[in-house]
């Protein structure tokens, strides 16, 4: 990528376009990555309530809690 000065408007536009292409390419996720699952309002309330009572869950508690909320075990500790 070339260095651009303020006196070169065409070069600046070209540099900006190149920057945007590079930034977009860097933000892409791997093809096999699972998309983010948004939590429902009920799930958030339940997770927040549990966190206030107990900020750490054992693996067994986490599995039980995840099943009750229809989440995976991996999604529960992300909140805690």
Image (tube, rainbow, N blue to C red):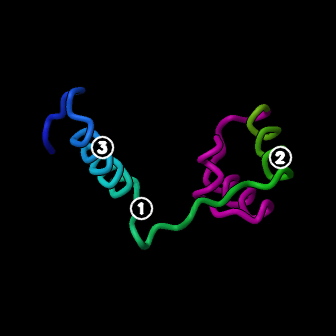
Tell me, for residue 50, which label it has, or none.
none
Discs 1, 3 touching: Cβ within 8 Å: no
Which is more foreground, mark 2 or mark 3?
Answer: 3
Residue 31 figure quarter: bottom left
The residue sitting at 59% across, 47% down in the picture is 78
The residue sitting at 80% across, 62% down in the picture is 68
Residues packed near mark 3 inside 10 Å, few (<14), some (14 to 19) or many (20 plus): few
Quick one: SS at disc 2?
helix
Tell me, for residue 46, which label it has, or none.
2
**Residue 61 at x, y = what percent?**
70, 52
N-terminal of the pair, mark 1 or mark 3, is 3
Residue at which label 1 appears: 29
Magenta portion: prevailing SS class: helix
Residue at which label 3 appears: 13
Give the magenta-colored segment's residue range. 53-80
Image height check: is 5 above or below 10?
above
Discs 2, 1 touching: Cβ within 8 Å: no
């Amino acid at each position: 990528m070339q260095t651009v000065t303020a006196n070169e408007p065409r070069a600046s536009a070209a540099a900006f376009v190149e920057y945007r292409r590079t930034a977009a390419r860097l933000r892409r996720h791997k093809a096999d990555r699972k998309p983010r699952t948004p939590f429902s309002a009920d799930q958030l309330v339940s997770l927040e309530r549990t966190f206030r009572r107990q900020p750490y869950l054992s693996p067994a508690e986490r599995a039980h809690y995840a099943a009750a909320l229809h989440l995976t075990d991996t999604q529960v500790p992300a909140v805690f």
